[in-house]
Image (cartoon, helix red, strand yellow):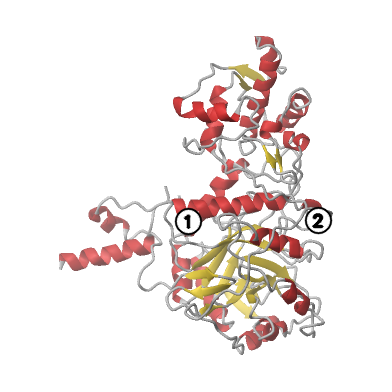
Amino acid sequence: MLFKSLSKLATAAAFFAGVATADDVPAIEVVGNKFFYSNNGSQFYIRGVAYQADTANETSGSTVNDPLANYESCSRDIPYLKKLNTNVIRVYAINTTLDHSECMKALNDADIYVIADLAAPATSINRDDPTWTVDLFNSYKTVVDTFANYTNVLGFFAGNEVTNNYTNTDASAFVKAAIRDVRQYISDKNYRKIPVGYSSNDDEDTRVKMADYFACGDDDVKADFYGINMYEWCGKSDFKTSGYADRTAEFKNLSIPVFFSEYGCNEVTPRLFTEVEALYGSNMTDVWSGGIVYMYFEETNKYGLVSIDGNDVKTLDDFNNYSSEINKISPTSANTKSYSATTSDVACPATGKYWSAATELPPTPNGGLCSCMNAANSCVVSDDVDSDDYETLFNWICNEVDCSGISANGTAGKYGAYSFCTPKEQLSFVMNLYYEKSGGSKSDCSFSGSATLQTATTQASCSSALKEIGSMGTNSASGSVDLGSGTESSTASSNASGSSSKSNSGSSGSSSSSSSSSASSSSSSKKNAATNVKANLAQVVFTSIISLSIAAGVGFALV
């Protein structure tokens, strides 16, 4: 009897911890350019719905309305999602401080998978001033930790429309670095192999080059899958007229799964969704793995399938039309037992007018290295200096000394060893450069009262790395320094910049996406780097079977 009781408690613990159980849906895996069920090898096509309202979560005080943290609403909506034959939802932003277990379990029981964006409006790569920082990496890690143990997480988007035209393709290097590092983090944490990809807009100048960029290179750097926000089929159209035939031809040799990460043009209403038959038909299924309809909630942009009034759900004409189309598809299905990938690895795009992202990617952010550097400085920024004043200091100092050690240039593929550190750490580094260049007297570390002297220290674990990097911060260290995430790291400031960053709605320039969509932006020369200055899974720990019995009734604890 005791054994049976302990067994029940263990099962409850697995639920609260988000650990896979026998009742979980099978994980989805990538083979070649297709998705497959891991349990039987049959092909998986995405029949998705974008699922995130464009309002603040008033109960949590968050600027993110996390749709997976409100069991009342997600349990209300799941029956409607099932009427739409939904097997995937996309969520654009997550509040990792909230509990997602109930919604994730309900989705699992309904055979619905989740693709989650790692970024959020306040924590994302800024297309106009791109960086890949310790703070951003820590933020992305938190999302991974929160969802890694749910088997019905199909994958993560490391960015959404970060590059949106040929003027900011350099930003893609930073997103690709994020994919590389998040994938390695998943491996280092011994999580199951969860795919990490990118969601792009449909820009005619960059769409092919960008897809090739994210699909090229060694397995440890290329994306696991690629989404494109596609709004070309409007009203009564067809495979050729819509542009679908051309897009299919352009992506036919892509070596990773590609799908519509958003679709559903609303230039003609109500939407008929006649593109569904084409997307899941024989002309497209060799190349495309389905798509995600934009979107579930009716808002001012008029893309909703349903309108919500409190707990009341009203289905709209778009809902009925889409339901009719998606419920009659029957795409051909491959199986891993007989499937062999016919696509070959693609070459990285050459740089030119319409593509400028280097294949050399930014370094993996290392907060420990930043801490090492900061401790080794004699002259550092004063704690009482407002981060809003950093820009002025950067602009002056970087005219006096070489700031390459903190710069990040995605076009040239040149990145300073401290390009991922916080603005405060970077400012201290260049202040110290000036201090040493000017002679090292107390007056050289004044900066009108903005800096102060400290006793420089170099820990034994830091010595080798700092020596390899050099005093200018322009070399790289052969090994990493594992000292945690750094003393100055703060997720809240990860998107701070001397230039104003902006949150981009996620659709292909059609203003269709929710403001909850992840954003991005920016330039990366030495000069601009100087102005970049403004400002797990919480684990469930059951130490004993007795403490487990206490915790099982109250869910998991975020620590």
Amino acid identity at mark 2: Tyr
When asked about the image quadrant of residue 293, the answer is bottom right
User: Where is residue 453 drawn, in percent x and y?
Assistant: 60, 16
Label 2 SS? helix
Q: Which residue is mark 1?
A: 146
Task: Measuring from the top left, give residue 509's x and y in whole percent.
Answer: 78, 63
Q: How many marks?
A: 2
Check whether the beta carbons of the residues at disc 1 and disc 2 lie within 8 A of each other: no
Q: For residue 248, which quarter of the picture?
A: bottom right
- Which residue position holds label 2? 166
Compared with 275, 485 (above or below) is above
The one nearer the camera, 137 or 287, is 287
The CA span between labels 1 and 2 is 35 Å
**Tag 1: amino acid:** Thr
Q: Which mark is residue 373?
A: none
Look at the picture and state if 243 lies above or below 11. below
Q: Residue at x 55, y 28 (%)?
A: 466
Residue lying furthest right in this view? 353
| Secondary structure category for the residue under label 1 | helix
Q: Viewer-nearest of labels 1 and 2?
A: 2
* Image point (67%, 34%), residue name: 406
Q: Position of residue 281 (x, y in %)?
A: 66, 86
Badge 2: few (under 14), some or many (20 or more) residues near its Cα, within 10 Å? some
Residue in front for this viewpoint, 393 or 12: 393
The quarter of the picture where the N terminus appears is bottom left
Specify whether 59 is left or right of 22: right
Badge 1 density bin: few <14, some 14–19, many ≥20, Cα 10 Å: many
Q: What x and y, as percent, mark residue 267?
A: 81, 76
Q: Is residue 97 visible?
A: no
Question: Mark 1 vs mark 2: which is more N-terminal?
Answer: 1
Q: Nearer the viewer, residue 348 or 235?
A: 348
Residue 148 seen in this snapshot: yes
